[in-house]
Image (tube, coloured by chain):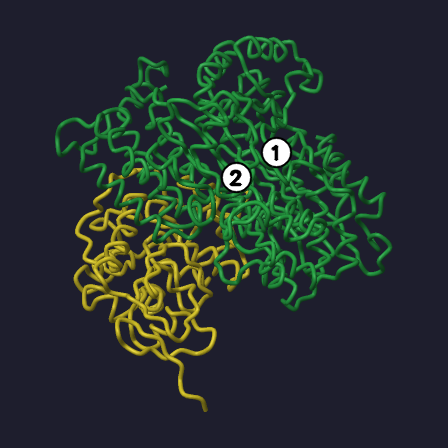
Amino acid sequence: MNTEKTFKLDGKDIPFKDGETVMDAALRAGEYIPHLCHNPDFPPHGSCRVCVVSVNGKHTCSCTLEASTGMDVDNSSEAIIDERRALLQMLFVEGNHTCPACEKSGECQLQAVAYHTGMLSPHFTHFFPKRSIDASHPEMMFYYNRCILCGLCVRVSRDVDKKSVFVISGRGFKSKLVFNSSSGKLGDTGFSASDKAASVCPVGAILPKYHGYEIPIGQRLYDKEPISVVGDTAAHNGDRTNGGSNE
Amino acid sequence: MQNLDNFIDKLLADSDDSPTRLLQHLIAIQQQYSHVPDEAIQVLSKRLDIPPVQIHSVIEFYAFLHRRARGDYDIRFSDNITDRMLGNRGLFRGMCRKLGVKPGVPRADGKVTVAMTSCTGLCDQGPALLANGIAVSRLTEERIHKIVGLIEAGTPVDNWPSRFFIIKDNIQRREQLLTDDLIKGSAIESLLTRGSDFLLEWLDQSGLRGRGGAGFKTATKWRYCRDAKAEEHFVVCNADEGEPGTFKDRILLNSYADCVFEGMTLCAGVVGAKKGFLYLRGEYLYLLEKLEKTLQKRRDARLLGNGILGCEGFDFDIEIHLGAGAYVCGEESALIESLEGKRGIPRNRPPFPVTSGYMQQPTVVNNVETLVAAARIAVCGPPWFRSSGTVESSGTKLFSISGDCERPGIYEYPFGVTIRQVLEDCGATDTQAVQISGAAGSTIPPQEFYRSIAFEDVPTGGSFMIFNKKRDLLKMVLNFSRFFCHESCGFCTPCRIGGRLMNDLVEKVMVGYATSYDLEELKKIGMVMKKTAHCGLGSTAPNPVLDTLEKFPGTYSKRLVNKSYEPAFNLEKALEVSRHLTGRDDEEAHLRLGN
């Protein structure tokens, strides 16, 4: 067999397979690159831009970038972290993210990545959009306030569940998630709590009904260890929803 | 709605049930019914096998598509900064007042809607508007008055005085590209005589680079596409000329369409494409019929179709697709998405269109002007082309000149011409700044007028907007920041949110509530957008702000309240509630937001 191909990430050699992205190779090697719209189980998307890295001086998204030898990837310089923090702050001011009152607090990837980058405040002027909740579905709730338009539910419902329950509509800052039903309500779609799309939301936009605060604040996923160690919330959603919900 | 059913049946009978036709169907329905009725969405959904909500999402993406009826008359004023400098706001308000309509809201009787739209490409003969999609130029108070009368009298737009619709080419200066037209078929004959390898060699030697502004080598693009193994290959002409201040393609499509199609056919012959698309921006709807006729004439002359010029196996035809008011579709991968009938969200690249474009097949996407140049090179050869321009930027470039000058219009110059020379020729005096390459381009101050237009110095897609010293450049900046806010596709965080944050801050500067801290914020957000955006729209959107902050700091500093901090509370925004409650929207009910 040939000698393994590698690229450099913050000075470390990261092995990669042909066609693998910088993100996937890094995660496989146990190196954390912050991300929100990316979920290693699904093809990369590249919309949140939080996984920005500098490759030989050029800033680019690591989840969509194919790895190649000779790459020198900066994943932790002040400049890169500043950019990520600004992107996260933008996401915070775009919606209404009131962490202390959110059921997902402590298990929310947006919150955890914000901690990871040292974000102390949303910094920018809040948009304070008027957004509602869709509680029409018997099992699941949708909180528009918290949606960050990562498109994970859209892709997973379309590609895995084969239902296309979710679609992003509108344009620019008027973009919004909509549901595939004639009434526009989630309850009138074919969505089910057992859909894969029900467990991929990185924030608290899609949550099961009738379950709240079953794990006390302080004992939740990211309360114990940072996201750079325990990884994505979606990878743990199974433990949480199944552990606490069925009986 | 029996009528609607018939209309859609006929629409669908004329084409296959491919979902790629969705956008074209929606445009046709919009034109017929001034909106896309829910019944139409249901029928399309069944026939094309697309969920209704996905059709909604396409409608909501394109500014020219609506789910609520606009009325018998759908009026859109072009709102580029050059239209504003020619007084479009006053005319717009006048028309709204006379018709008794609120901007963007259909009149209660369902007759008319008057709204604003992004630059419609008539900057040299503005102010301009679109009446049911058809361009009307040179608006004056008198013309507005007449239009209001025609609307109230219920006169169909087709029967309005033809002088309203005169769009002049306005060519002020010609060089090699515009002097002679091509003899029809001569470029294709050259290909058939010399062979594609030889022609690629010619394109290489001529040094032709993409005229859209990015300057990628045309021969390299064609070669990549040709060498990509696939079932099919495609050629796309990007006529989505949406960059504010650009209108050169309008002229090429109007008077040099044969040359454009010849360039596409040449490319098809080289890369082995059977099918080509011309993606025509919706604003140029008035050119469609003429272009279709030109295509038919070319088919009749065996310059398109099967066995072109008698050469067996050389089969190629061209279909025209319309855009529907989305600037981002000028980005080649967004354009391809739009061609496939979808929302125009730029794709992740690589793979590039040359290996995976339309329907994931190798696709060449070229600017209109590039294709014209390629066709001419195929006939006249590299030395002819190289006789103009610089070593790195060979040939000539069409400039779309508008703004403060005596003779706006189309100017063809060899690459390497200085900005000063151009300003002199078009009769610009007392110039404060030139905005080169559109809203996404660069703002050039007088001390840099010695610079030349070329890929190696100041590159351009052709837009050249001139501002004299009486102009308030901040109005330009605000116009552009609103434009980008409106045109962002919304896919990536920095452009979707950063663009809006920047626009809000520029508004804050405009009303005089900004501080030097806010200017630093603008720079910071702008740099984040530049470095992290998904596509060229997002990464160039901050340019006008960043450029003017650097080169025209006085534009901002003279408006700063002499404090280092001002709360984020925005009085103008807070007033919105009071305006809504009192039903007022007159000037007195606003802070000073410019005109």
Tell me the shade of chain B: green
B475 left or right of B336 in image: left
Between residue A12 and residue B97, name the one nearer to us: A12
Q: Quadrant of the N terminus of chain A?
A: bottom left
Between residue B538 and residue B50, name the one nearer to us: B538
Q: Badge 2, how many Cα within 10 Å: few under 14, some, many 20+?
A: many
Of mark 2 and mark 1, the one earlier in the sequence is: 1
Which residue in the protein does label 2 denote? B326
Label 1 SS: loop
The image quadrant of residue B154 is top right
Q: Quadrant of the C terminus of chain A?
A: bottom left
Q: Chain of mark 2?
A: B
Label 2 SS: loop
Looking at the image, can residue B37 be seen?
Answer: no
Between residue A62 and residue B429, name the one nearer to us: B429
Q: Badge 1, how many Cα within 10 Å: few under 14, some, many 20+?
A: some
Question: In the rendered view, would you say B65 is above or below A53?
Answer: above
- Mark 2 residue type: Ala
Asked whether disc 2 touches disc 1, contact meaning CB atoms under 8 Å apart, the reply is: no
Which residue in the protein does label 1 denote? B174
Q: Position of residue B591 (x, y in %)?
A: 28, 19
The answer as to whether the residues below labels 2 and 1 share one chain is: yes
Instruction: Tell me which residue sits at (30%, 29%) in the image.
Output: B507
The image quadrant of residue A74 is bottom left
- Mark 1 residue type: Arg
Q: Position of residue A232 (x, y in %)?
A: 32, 66
Tell me the shade of chain A: yellow
